[in-house]
Structures are given as structure tokens and as C-alpha cells.
Image (cartoon, helix red, strand yellow):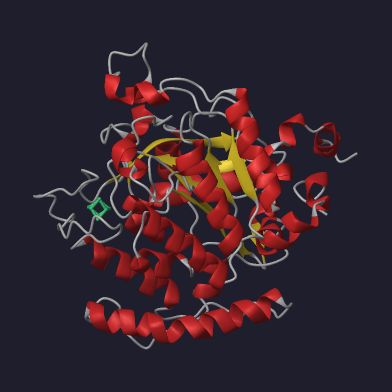
């Protein structure tokens, strides 16, 4: 049993059921999905086929992939990677084709981000920018574990949340450093070999960097080992580079190849096409469900089609039998219009999902009265939620029978604290 699995939080059967695949990959008992995708051959040459033909091929190969995934879940061995193009390269090629008429998210800007002549709502061309990467010890216990979640933090966003708690990263497209796929792969490779329990792709928003991330994952699936120059390049954005982490190659190994669970930590404002690619590469998903079905996504985040997009994508995860947990941040004055409908929807559509009903909202960005950026129209959320608002939210989740207490209250739970040390 490895350090993550020794945590007593796994004694909660609901959590263990919901995250069984993730835990198996984190403990290297199973290969990550990208290791499976590279064993599924494609007869197409991704470099010359039309995009329509590539999508048809992806649709046709997905059932083969899923059948192999099921068999491996049940204990079958991992086949050898194919020598020619595989489903992994098909995913990479499709992500780059999408970049040429960008439809990663529902803004569907249709701009050619390769030329960068016109930019879409996220204001990005083809370059991906990383603000920082590090062992994140602030995520949920089952993600941060004992050694941290291997977090790679991207800049810019496709939503405009007035209260964004990472406003310096999400609203500044030039924050951080531009990185290529090899540098990204290097970051993931180092973090996992230093003991991180997963590779946590997060932003701002991550889907707007889909091409670069899929490219990096494709490298990791093909035996990528960074050069000294790549190691030095990646190190410049490593926030904890002056801390000592022992290198443990065995911690990143399944069947003599690099292994790490891919964690997609996202606002989930993304298209079906992005979802279809990510389904083949993501081992565990972490969607935010922020706003109710009313106008709040528009008034607070300038985001149309929010409710139908995000609930639709989360419902897909359940239909696809994926591992996932949901985050909902309780906002002041938005318990009735956002928190209750969000929790009701979860209870009705994905009742087995572990949920983090989060209390840490604080006024930030355009909602912080102490900031020069403050806008008076956001006065209604320019404070922390009150204890009665939080209690009412948790009480509602309790009444609905949601699986939220282990996740939401783990830091206050002495049982969990003793579990941290495997006692
Ligand atoms: S990622 Fe979304 S916001 Fe950015 S260009 Fe593509 S469709 Fe537009």
C-alpha cells in the first residue's frame, strides 16, 4: 500500500467507489489512460487526413479504447504501445486542428489561433503560458495526499468571474512564461518523480490550452525523458524549486513506463469536442459548479450558456462512468439562487459524486472593496459568506443525502488528521 492509500480518508466507501480508478493509477497498480490510448492503433495518417475523417476515426476507436480500459480495470495486462500512429497521436492532431478554428469552449470563437491575427474571448494565440507549477498542498486530501498534487497553473480564462480568487493569473494573459509541450511534459515528469500523487492541470482555465496539454501528454506516453536544458527551462516556473524533494523514479512507473493520473481541474465550460478528446486521457475530473440556472453566471461572470454547458458535461462524466468530484463555492447572497439549485441538481443527476461545499469565498478581484479594481455593482458579494449562510448550505446538502462531509470537513476532522500519518 502506498502513501496515498494509507490515508484513512479512503475508509469512506463512497469516496473509494467514486475514485477507484484514480487511486489505482496513483498507486501504479494500473496504467494511466494515456498509456492505454497509445496501445490502440489508427489506420489513418493523422498528418494528412481531413479533420472530418479524424473525428470519424476517433468515434470509431473510442469503443475499442473503452473495452480495453474495462479489461485493464478488471486486471488484464497492458498491451505494448503501437509502433505507428495511435489513438494518442490522433487526440493530439485533433486538438491542433481545433486550434485552427478554435472551438475548445462554447464561445466557439472560430479564430485561427495558429496565426494569432484575431484573438477569441480568452485572448490567446497558440502559445500556452504557465504561471507556476509546484507540489500543491491545498487541494482536497485525496488529491494532495502526503506529497502534494503536482499542479501546473496556466494563465488566462474563458470566464470573467468578478470575484476570481486567482485574478492575477486569470485576467492577465501575459502572466507567467510561454512554454512548449516539451517543457510542460518536463514539469509533469519532475513533479510525479518527486512523489506527487497526480498531475493537476489547472488555471485560470485549462481547456483554452488543450492543444499544448494533449501534446505534452502524448510525449509522456511515448517514453519522453527531458534533456538538461528542458529541466532547466521548466525549473524557472517551479514555485518550490528551493525545497528538497527526493527523486523517486519508481513512484512514476508502471510496467517500465512513465505513469501518473491525469487530473482535469476545470470550470467545465468546454465543448463536447474537447470532452471527447479528454475522455481518452483523463483519469479523474474536478469540475466547478458555481452558478445556478438563473442570470448569475451572466451578471457575475459574463458567461452565457453556463448552466446547460457545465451540468451537461458533468452528467456526461456520470454516463461515461468516470471518476470525478465536484466543487461548489458558497457565495454571499447567492445561497438561494446558486447553492440550492446546484446541490439539488447534483442530488438528482449525480448523487454518488463526492462534493466539496466550500466556505473559503472572500471578496477579491472586482469585488474587493479595498482594491482599486473594485466595482460598486458587485457590492452584494463584497463580503465573506456568513456562518448562517454556510450552515444553511451544508444543512441543505445533508438533507439531500449528498456525499459531501468527508470532503468538505476533512481539515477539521481529527480522525483524518491521525490518518495523515497512517495511524
Ligand atoms: S478557447 Fe474558447 S475563448 Fe479561447 S479562442 Fe477558443 S473558443 Fe474562444
On-image quarter of the C terminus = top right
On-image quarter of the N terminus = bottom right
Query: Closer to the camera, 206 or 194?
Result: 206
Where does the image place residue 199, in percent across and percent down from the top left? 55, 49
Find residue 74 and report its image quarter: bottom right
Q: Residue at x 43, y 71 (%)?
A: 88
Q: Is residue 285 visible?
A: no
For residue 170, side relative to residue 255 (left or right): left
Q: Residue at x 47, y 43 (%)?
A: 338
Instruction: Report the residue that reaches farthest toward the top.
Output: 370
Instruction: Report the residue that reaches farthest toward the front.
Output: 336
Give the answer, above or below, for where 113 lies relative to 77.
Answer: above
Where does the image place residue 370, in percent across and percent down from the top left? 37, 11
> What is the count of numbered marks?
0
Query: Closer to the camera, 77 or 398?
Result: 398
Find residue 422 and report its image quarter: top right
Q: Is residue 252 visible?
A: yes
Instruction: Report the residue that reaches farthest toward the left.
Output: 117
Where does the image place residue 141, in percent across and percent down from the top left? 69, 41
Where does the image place residue 239, in percent across and percent down from the top left? 49, 29
For residue 196, side relative to residue 87 (left or right): right
Give the answer, above or below, for where 303 lies relative to 259.
Answer: above
Q: Residue at x 52, y 80 (%)?
A: 65
Query: Closer to the camera, 166 or 245?
Result: 166
For residue 217, side relative to residue 418 (left or right): left
Give the answer, above or below, for where 87 lies relative to 343.
Answer: below
For residue 308, side relative to residue 2 (left or right): left
Give the answer, above or below, for where 423 lies relative to 278.
Answer: above
Amino acid at each position: 500500500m502506498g502513501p496515498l492509500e494509507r490515508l484513512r480518508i479512503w475508509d469512506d466507501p463512497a469516496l473509494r467507489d467514486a475514485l477507484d480508478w484514480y487511486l489505482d493509477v496513483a498507486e501504479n497498480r494500473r496504467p494511466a489512460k494515456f498509456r492505454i490510448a497509445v496501445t490502440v492503433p489508427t489506420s489513418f495518417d493523422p498528418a494528412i487526413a481531413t479533420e472530418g475523417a479524424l473525428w470519424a476515426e476517433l468515434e470509431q476507436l473510442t469503443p475499442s479504447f473503452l473495452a480495453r480500459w474495462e479489461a485493464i480495470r478488471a486486471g488484464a495486462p497492458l498491451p505494448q504501445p503501437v509502433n505507428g500512429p495511435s489513438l494518442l497521436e490522433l487526440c493530439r492532431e485533433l486538438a491542433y486542428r481545433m486550434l485552427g478554428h478554435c472551438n475548445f469552449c462554447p464561445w466557439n470563437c472560430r479564430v485561427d489561433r495558429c496565426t494569432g491575427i484575431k484573438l477569441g474571448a480568452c485572448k490567446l494565440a497558440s502559445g500556452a503560458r504557465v504561471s507556476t507549477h509546484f507540489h500543491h498542498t491545498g487541494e482536497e486530501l485525496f488529491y494532495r495526499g502526503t506529497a502534494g498534487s503536482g499542479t501546473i497553473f496556466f494563465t488566462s480564462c474563458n470566464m470573467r468571474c468578478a470575484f476570481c480568487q486567482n485574478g492575477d493569473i486569470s485576467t492577465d494573459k501575459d502572466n507567467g512564461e510561454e512554454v512548449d509541450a516539451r517543457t510542460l511534459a518536463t514539469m509533469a515528469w519532475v513533479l510525479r518523480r518527486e512523489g506527487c500523487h497526480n498531475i493537476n492541470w489547472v488555471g485560470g482555465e485549462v481547456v483554452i490550452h488543450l492543444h499544448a496539454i494533449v501534446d505534452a501528454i502524448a510525449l509522456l506516453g511515448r517514453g519522453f525523458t527531458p534533456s538538461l536544458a528542458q529541466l532547466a527551462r521548466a525549473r524557472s516556473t517551479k514555485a518550490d524549486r528551493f525545497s528538497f524533494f527526493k527523486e523517486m523514479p519508481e513512484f512514476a512507473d508502471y510496467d517500465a513506463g512513465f505513469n501518473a493520473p491525469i487530473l482535469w481541474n476545470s470550470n467545465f465550460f468546454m465543448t463536447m469536442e474537447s470532452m471527447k478528446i479528454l475522455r481518452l486521457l483523463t483519469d479523474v475530473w474536478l469540475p466547478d459548479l458555481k452558478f445556478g440556472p438563473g442570470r448569475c453566471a451572466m451578471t457575475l461572470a459574463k458567461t452565457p450558456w453556463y448552466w446547460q454547458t457545465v451540468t451537461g458535461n458533468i452528467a456526461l462524466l456520470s454516463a461515461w462512468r468516470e471518476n470525478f468530484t465536484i466543487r461548489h463555492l458558497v457565495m454571499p447572497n447567492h445561497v438561494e439562487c446558486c447553492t440550492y439549485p446546484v446541490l439539488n441538481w447534483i442530488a438528482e443527476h449525480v448523487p454518488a459524486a463526492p462534493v466539496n461545499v466550500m466556505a473559503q469565498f472572500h471578496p477579491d478581484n472586482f469585488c474587493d472593496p479595498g482594491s482599486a479594481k473594485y466595482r460598486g455593482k458587485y457590492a452584494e458579494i463584497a463580503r465573506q459568506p456568513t456562518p448562517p449562510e454556510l450552515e444553511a448550505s451544508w444543512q441543505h446538502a445533508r438533507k439531500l443525502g449528498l456525499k459531501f462531509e468527508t470532503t468538505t470537513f476533512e481539515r477539521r476532522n481529527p480522525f483524518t488528521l491521525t490518518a495523515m500519518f497512517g495511524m
